[in-house]
């Protein structure tokens, strides 16, 4: 297994401290604050550890309240809010330095049949095998890219991204606020559906807020941009594997008040809608 994927699995494997209390650590990769997707994934794991496996998570809604410190463990406290016949509700609080940095409520449901419909996958999206892999990106698309962009793509990561369009990384031209990115874990994952949901929660925070910048001709790599996730919502619709290619189809309907709203639909290779996301984030243009 690739070291980056093994590190991700270790990060998501929380240490139980007491009933309803878990401790998570952050990888030491030199970041100034904890990646939001990591907190989402860890909080989903904490909630699932208090629910029967027959009740998988179907939705989560979280708020980022303070930046996480990667040098300090995060304590996750789970409140077993409700255990009904069909649904179980959990509140999760992430704590560092005695203060709350993240709060989440997650709902879990016993599997049952019902009416079934899903929006179709966007048409005419290139398949992942038709797009440049990471080595090709380094050699061609990123050859003349700024150092910060090149270093971002060159760093070994547990998640492979294959954007269908790289223009927003390389131009200041305003573009439609739409983005399609193929994503997957870089190595085979254990056959644990809860772990795959946690990994999808982890990667769902990647590229999503960036989409709200397209129409403004800006990028998350621009030094004048102050970016941060404010909240994150996710719905799990159908079974999937996070180590197989998934299309992350994103759009942004609004940006205002130094905030941007982005939405995402996640499809598997067969075109099935497996999950949906929504996120509002800070996108402040600093004047100095």
Image: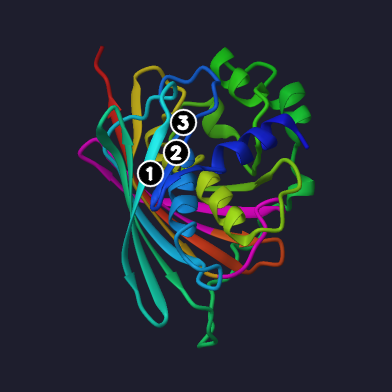
Specify whether residue 258 is painted magenta: yes
Q: Residue 173 has which mark?
A: 3
In space, the residues marked 2 and 3 are separated at their CA atoms by: 44 Å
Q: Residue furthest front?
A: 18
In space, the residues marked 3 and 1 are separated at their CA atoms by: 42 Å
Residues at marks 1 and 2 touching, judged by CB atoms closer than 8 Å: yes
Residue 88 lies, in percent from the top left, at 39, 71
Above or below residue 31? Residue 59 is below
Circle nearer the viewer, 2 or 3: 2
Q: Is residue 278 left or right of residue 42?
A: left
Dot 1 alpha-carbon crowd within 10 angstroms: few under 14, some 14 to 19, many 20 or more: many
Q: Earlier in the sequence, mark 2 or mark 3?
A: 2
Circle nearer the viewer, 3 or 1: 1
Residue 227 lies, in percent from the top left, at 35, 30
Q: Earlier in the sequence, mark 3 or mark 1?
A: 1
Segment tinted magenta in the rendering: 238-265
Q: Which quarter of the figure is the N terminus placed in?
A: top right
Residue 89 lies, in percent from the top left, at 35, 66
Above or below residue 158? Residue 276 is below
Q: Residue 23 has which mark?
A: 2
Residue 161 lies, in percent from the top left, at 64, 40
| Secondary element at image label 3 | loop
In space, the residues marked 1 and 2 are separated at their CA atoms by: 6 Å
**Disc 1 designates what residue?**
76
Dot 3 alpha-carbon crowd within 10 angstroms: few under 14, some 14 to 19, many 20 or more: few
Please state which of residues 166 and 41 is positioned toward the viewer in this rendering.
41
Q: Which residue lies at the image location 57% right of the left edge and 65% below the top edge?
A: 274
| Tally of numbered discs | 3
Please state which of residues 77 and 199 is positioned toward the viewer in this rendering.
77
Q: Is residue 14 left or right of residue 186?
A: left
């Amino acid at each position: 297994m690739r070291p980056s994927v093994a590190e991700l699995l270790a990060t998501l494997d929380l240490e139980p401290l007491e009933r309803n209390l878990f401790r998570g650590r952050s990888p030491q990769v030199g970041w100034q604050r904890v990646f939001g997707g990591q907190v989402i994934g860890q909080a989903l794991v904490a909630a699932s550890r208090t629910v029967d496996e027959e009740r998988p998570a179907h939705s989560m809604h979280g708020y980022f309240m303070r930046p996480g410190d990667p040098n300090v463990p995060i304590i996750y406290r789970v409140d077993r809010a409700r255990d009904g016949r069909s649904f179980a509700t959990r509140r999760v609080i992430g704590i560092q330095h005695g203060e709350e940095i993240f709060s989440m409520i997650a709902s879990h449901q016993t599997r049952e049949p019902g009416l079934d419909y899903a929006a179709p996958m966007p048409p005419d999206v290139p398949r992942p095998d038709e797009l440049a892999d990471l080595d090709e990106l380094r050699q061609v698309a990123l050859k003349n890219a700024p150092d910060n962009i090149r270093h971002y793509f060159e760093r070994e990561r547990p998640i492979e991204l294959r954007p269908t369009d790289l223009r927003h990384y390389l131009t200041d031209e305003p573009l439609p606020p739409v983005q399609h990115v193929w994503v997957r874990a870089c190595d085979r994952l254990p056959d644990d559906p809860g772990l795959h949901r946690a990994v999808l929660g982890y990667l769902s925070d990647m590229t999503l807020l960036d989409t709200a910048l397209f129409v403004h001709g800006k990028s998350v790599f621009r030094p004048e941009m102050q970016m941060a996730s404010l909240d994150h919502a996710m719905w799990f619709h159908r079974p999937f594997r996070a180590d197989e290619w998934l299309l992350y189809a994103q759009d942004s309907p609004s940006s205002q008040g130094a905030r941007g709203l982005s939405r995402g639909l996640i499809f598997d290779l067969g075109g099935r809608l497996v999950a949906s996301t929504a996120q509002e984030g800070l996108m402040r243009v600093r004047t100095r």
